[in-house]
Amino acid sequence: MSARKWLPVWQRIPGSSPQRWRRIGWRRFKPFRADQHIKGLRPVREVPREDREVYKRTIIAAARVAEQFGEVWHCRSSYRTYAEQAALYAAYVNGTGSLAAKPGTSRHEKGNALDLGDARNVNIGNSAVRRAALERAGFVFAVPSEPWHVEYQG
Ligand SMILES: [Zn+2]
């Protein structure tokens, strides 16, 4: 259960000098939720405690960028366990899956990598403005051949 919080809404009194403000109402405090701006994120509660803070910082930073564009983005892959990475790697090695890093070496296992598509699920790095905005927010496109894979360095 979340605590109910209210914030005052202020308006400048026109022509006041020195400047004066009056309270014109209240609005409910709405906590920022990354999953409202990026669909397909793994729920934080599924991420092991030791990786959770990094994961939370990463998804919030990416969701803030999606919010800047007023868009809902798609996440194809976020946090992965070692076992999940091992399965992806095995599929890659036997030819049934796409390129995947060796288990134990993927940033997805650390919580700071996301595979992102835009509102139409086009690779996020295909858009120069979205790419630049992510880079300003602390993300790097660490794999040149993967314009969907971003790693948070913030
Ligand atoms: Zn990736």
Image: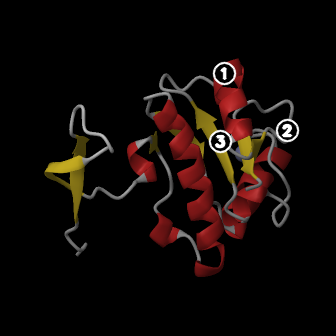
Neighbour tally class for label 1: few under 14, some 14-19, many 20 plus, Cα within 10 Å: few
User: Residue at horizontal 71%, vertical 57%?
Assistant: 108
Q: Which residue is mark 3?
A: 115
Q: Identify which amino acid the numbered label 3 is placed on.
A: Asp
* Location of residue 25 in the rendering, given as x and y in whole percent from the top left corner: 13, 50
Helix or strand or loop: what does disc 2 sit on?
Answer: loop
Q: Identify which amino acid the numbered label 2 is placed on.
A: Val
User: Residue at horizontal 23%, vertical 74%?
Assistant: 3
Q: Quadrant of the C terminus?
A: bottom right
Mark 2 and ligand 1: say if the CB distance to the nearest ligand atom is below 8 Å: yes
Q: Which residue is mark 2?
A: 143
Q: Quadrant of residue 144?
A: top right
Eyeballing the image, is 115 above or below 9? above
The disc at residue 129 is 1
Proximity of marks 3 and 1: CB atoms separated by less than 8 Å: no
Helix or strand or loop: what does disc 1 sit on?
Answer: helix
Mark 3 and ligand 1: say if the CB distance to the nearest ligand atom is below 8 Å: yes
**Mark with earlier residue (2, 1):** 1
Q: Is residue 38 left or right of residue 15?
A: right
The disc at residue 119 is none
Dot in front, 3 or 1: 1
**Colour scheme employed for the rendering of this structure:** secondary structure
Helix or strand or loop: what does disc 3 sit on?
Answer: strand
